[in-house]
Image (cartoon, grey):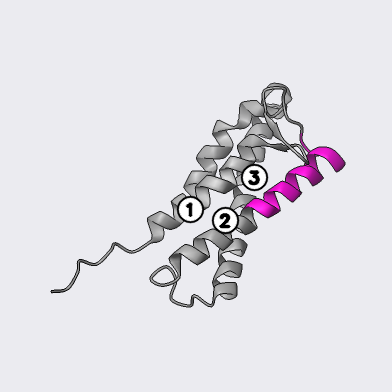
Amino acid sequence: MLALNLAWEVAQLPLYTLWLEGMPGEIAFAVLHCTGGDAMIAAVALAAAILLTRSWHWPSQGWGSVALIATLIGLGYTVFSEWLNVDLRQSWTYTAAMPRLPPWGTGLAPFLQWLLLPPLAMLAARPPARPFAR
């Protein structure tokens, strides 16, 4: 999940004004800071999903329900965080190239990040299927 988020953070940089206005050191710090935050969000979402589903043997058991709940938690937090940091705190700003989703104006790139990356990372963690016993 960490590698996927790092790649995503770098790829979506042109959708933020920091890409145009920031110094190289500021941009590098932002990428590392955001990737670290992504790792924390992912860890909390996964832990909460395991607790909520009582899937103590995840990923061997309860993979689908944990993946769904963790993805929804990460997505919910992202929608809230983007609204808080873009609209209220104005900690970061989207460029005009960032498509925004109603009703809160969440950027499409961070929304897709948390819709797609958690299931992909969890697929990688899923143990291989065992062949059918005869």
| Amino acid marked by disc 2 | Thr
In this rendering, which labeled residue sits more in front, label 1 or label 3? 1
Numbered circle sitting on residue 17: none
Q: Quadrant of residue 57?
A: bottom left
Q: Which residue is mark 3?
A: 34
Disc 3 element = helix
Residue 65 pos. (x, y %): 50, 66
Residues in magenta? 75-92
- What's the residue type where badge 3 is placed? Cys
Q: Residue at x 39, y 55 (%)?
A: 124
Q: Are marks 2 and 1 in contact (CB under 8 Å)?
A: yes
Q: Residue at x 76, y 32 (%)?
A: 93
> Is residue 89 in view?
no
Q: Quick check: is 85 in the magenta stretch?
A: yes
Residue bearing the label numbered 1: 119
| Residue pictured at 61% horizontal, 56% vertical | 72
Residue 12: percent from left, percent from top:
59, 32
Q: Nearer the viewer, residue 2 or 57?
A: 57
Q: Residues within 10 Å of mark 3 (few under 14, many from 20)?
A: some
Nearest to the eye among marks 2 and 3: give it: 2
Q: Quadrant of residue 11?
A: top right
Rendered view: 64 above or below 14: below
Circle 2 sits on which residue? 71
In this view, the residue farthest toward the right is 88
Position of residue 71 measured from the top left corner of the image (x, y, whole percent): 57, 56
Q: Is residue 113 magenta?
A: no
